[in-house]
Image (tube, rainbow, N blue to C red):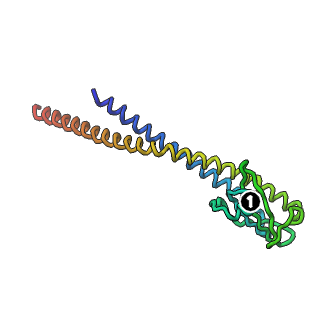
């Protein structure tokens, strides 16, 4: 009589735990998509000119940027094709609307966009910056998602621990009942064989 109820309880606990696993899987999927987006944004055709860039969180004011202590989100070295071998170092700072403020540098000298490279190079750079813009927006969404998940997981961890304890107790109880039923059936079988 109680065995079906136990099975229903076990199935419910397993379903709840599976839902938690699915939620964690969705978060991992978002992280994988973000990584793929970063790699796609960092693909370069050739290896003639080196580009170094840093995506950072900070204010537009250079003095505030230098003094701020926020963590660097991305730092890579890019290479791309150019008619001349030039090393461009530029920093990309994310603003509140997830756009990028760009400063191009040739050595220690700041270079205007028109002076730094030909139109093909600028078009290629703009294309990657648009991709990086989308990646940065994904980062912000993922950070909000993770922050909300951390707040939810504090209560979820306690609930999950209780569920796992309940699941363990139900499993042990089910094993005990199953063992009892099996032993009883064996005794009945042995008795019937003796009667024959």
User: Seen in the image, is 76 located left or right of residue 154?
Assistant: right
User: Where does residue 194 sit, x and y in percent of width and height?
Assistant: 10, 35
Question: Does residue 63 sit above or below 3 in this rendering?
Answer: below
> Which residue is at a point 68% across and 64% down the rendered structure image?
67
> Which residue is at a point 75% across and 57% down the rendered structure image?
60
User: Where does residue 66 sit, x and y in percent of width and height?
Assistant: 70, 65
Residue marked by disc 1: 92
Which residue extends farthest top? Answer: 1
Q: Nearer the viewer, residue 29 or 132?
A: 132
Question: Does residue 170 sit above or below 1 in this rendering?
Answer: below
Question: Does residue 60 sit above or below 178 in this rendering?
Answer: below
Question: Does residue 196 sit above or below 85 in this rendering?
Answer: above
Quadrant of the image containing the C terminus: top left
> Looking at the rendering, which quadrant does residue 61 occupy?
bottom right
User: Seen in the image, is 75 located left or right of residue 87?
Assistant: left
User: Where does residue 183 sit, x and y in percent of width and height?
Assistant: 19, 38
> Looking at the rendering, which quadrant does residue 104 occupy?
bottom right
Quadrant of the image containing the N terminus: top left
């Amino acid at each position: 009589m109680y065995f079906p109820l136990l099975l229903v309880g076990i199935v419910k606990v397993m379903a709840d735990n599976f839902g938690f696993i699915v939620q964690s899987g969705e978060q991992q999927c978002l992280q994988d998509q973000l990584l793929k987006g970063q790699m796609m944004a960092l693909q370069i055709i050739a290896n003639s000119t080196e580009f170094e860039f840093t995506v950072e969180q900070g204010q537009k004011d250079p003095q505030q940027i230098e003094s701020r202590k926020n963590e660097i989100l991305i730092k890579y070295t890019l290479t791309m094709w150019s008619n001349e071998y030039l090393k461009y170092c530029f920093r990309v700072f994310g603003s509140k609307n997830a756009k990028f403020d760009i400063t191009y540098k040739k050595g220690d000298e700041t270079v205007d966009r028109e002076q730094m490279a030909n139109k093909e190079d600028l078009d290629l750079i703009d294309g990657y910056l648009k991709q990086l813009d989308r990646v940065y927006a994904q980062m912000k969404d993922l950070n909000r998602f993770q922050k909300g998940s951390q707040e939810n997981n504090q209560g979820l961890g306690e609930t999950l621990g209780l569920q796992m304890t309940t699941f363990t107790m139900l499993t042990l109880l089910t094993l005990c009942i199953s063992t009892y039923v099996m032993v009883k059936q064996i005794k009945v079988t042995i008795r019937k064989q003796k009667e024959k």
